[in-house]
Amino acid sequence: MRLIFIATMAALMVGQVAAKDVLSGASLYADVGRYASFGLHRFGSPGDRATADWIAGELSEAGFAIKFQPVVLGRQYVVERASVAAAGAAVEATPFWWPPEDKASFHLSAPLARDGDVAGKILWIDLPFDRGAYLGPAHRAAIAEAAAKKPATILLMIGNPADDRFAYNVTQEDAPWPVPVMVVGAKARGTFDRALASGAPVTFDVAGHYDRNVSGRNVIAETGIGRGPTIVVSTPMTGWYTCVCERGPGIANFLALARTTAAEKWPAHFVFIATAGHEIGHGGMELFLKDGAPAPKDTLAWIHFGSSNACYAFADGARTVRPQEERALVLSKSAVALTDEAFAAIAAKRLVAEKQAIGELRDVHAAGYANFLGMAGRHQTFHTPADDLRATGPEILEPVARAFVDAVRKIVERGDAAFR
């Protein structure tokens, strides 16, 4: 009996050591680095495919049963190259989704204008910094008003802390713009001021194309069927650019939680789902909720790792050692007490989603899942090409991962009582 006890304790200690290793800041940051290594993460891209393969491999190695769920979205625009030349300088540009289908590629030289008769010219407009991630009615109205003036092209600067090319999430149902809309970073404002003052032509060189019925994949990993209550854990994989701190910390948290549950053999049925198509309509999450997700009545809890949950804050243009302030714990009313307990040391706004959640949790909430908890935010280089490994680090990744593991462990131990 004593030998059995010693063997059991040794097994538990091994599990705890494994959990501590995968929850270390170094381990988490290594996963963010691996995600970053795949480059562009736009839906349907090689980086999207490589990410899905990597996540599936990691979860399979942890002991999960893996399946890929095909995600087919009606369209995706693929940028081959895009630049603008003005006042003797070349500036990087990004088409604003969705471009006109007959102008997926174009070359144009024309004068730049701010007002007056802009027909046939390049109309320069600005959208203010609104702290949002999704294309909304105000953005559509501003661009529609500009396009009604019959410019050849719209040059767009979107306010953001990085002064870089910003992208808003769109849907598959959004109509293409009447004329091409090209986004440039405000850091190049001086170049365009000079072009405007001199009247010199501004030249766009854009090559791109539309793909139809574009294929991607959700990664679904499952373990512990029949062992206990069902808990779903989700995170998006795709985004506009490299998305290193937008998506990377959430994916690292997701993998760390999965490895911990497997190593410690928690008595629960876990379904881990990594979704594709986030930036162009939440296609992967929408599909999973329709086909593959456990029914709300059979699901004890839904845990979601959203955007920018462990990124550095900036002050006076310099990176600090603190996490960014613009992140929120998004939770059902039933999860308030649990969140207060498990996330006491995590600085984040509490958003109790009685009517409206944010990000992909809004789809989960709308689908009727009663108990949910997630974190999402925005950081300095959010939705821009400047989002890279400098935006996060081991010391701010680890506390978030440990808080989520603590919360889910309590859910497993307490069952329904965790939400009372």
Image (cartoon, grey):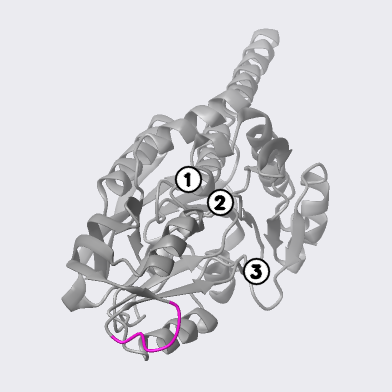
Kind of residue at disc 2: Ala
Question: Which residue is nearer to you in this view: 65 or 234?
Answer: 234
Task: Give yes or no for contact between labels 2 and 1 (Cβ–Cβ under 8 Å).
Answer: yes
Q: Is residue 41 above or below residue 168?
A: above
Q: Secondary structure at mark 1?
A: loop
Q: Which residue is mark 3?
A: 370
The crowding category of the residue bearing disc 3, from other C-alpha atoms within 10 Å (few below 14, some 14 to 19, many at least 20), is: many
Q: How many marks?
A: 3
Task: Give yes or no for contact between labels 3 and 1 (Cβ–Cβ under 8 Å).
Answer: no
Q: Nearer the viewer, mark 2 or mark 3?
A: 2
Question: Which residue is nearer to you in this view: 284 or 123?
Answer: 123
Predominant secondary structure in magenta? loop
Label 3 or label 1, whichever comes before in sequence order: 3
Identified at 67% across, 39% down, the residue is 318
Q: CA distance from mark 2 to mark 3?
A: 37 Å
Q: Secondary structure at mark 3?
A: loop
Instruction: Please provide percent x and percent y for residue 218.
Output: 35, 54
Instruction: Please provide percent x and percent y for residue 407.
Output: 71, 46
Give the side of residue 403 with respect to residue 62, left or right. Answer: right
Identified at 38% across, 64% down, the residue is 195
Kind of residue at disc 3: Ala
The crowding category of the residue bearing disc 1, from other C-alpha atoms within 10 Å (few below 14, some 14 to 19, many at least 20), is: many
Q: Which residue is mark 2?
A: 162
Q: Is residue 410 above or below residue 24?
A: below
Q: Which residues are the magenta region?
A: 114-119
The crowding category of the residue bearing disc 2, from other C-alpha atoms within 10 Å (few below 14, some 14 to 19, many at least 20), is: many
Q: Indicate the quadrant where residue 373 lies.
A: bottom right
Picture quarter with the N terminus: top right
Is 237 contained in the magenta span? no
Question: Which residue is nearer to you in this view: 390 or 344?
Answer: 390
Q: Which residue is mark 1?
A: 386
Q: Nearer the viewer, mark 3 or mark 1?
A: 1
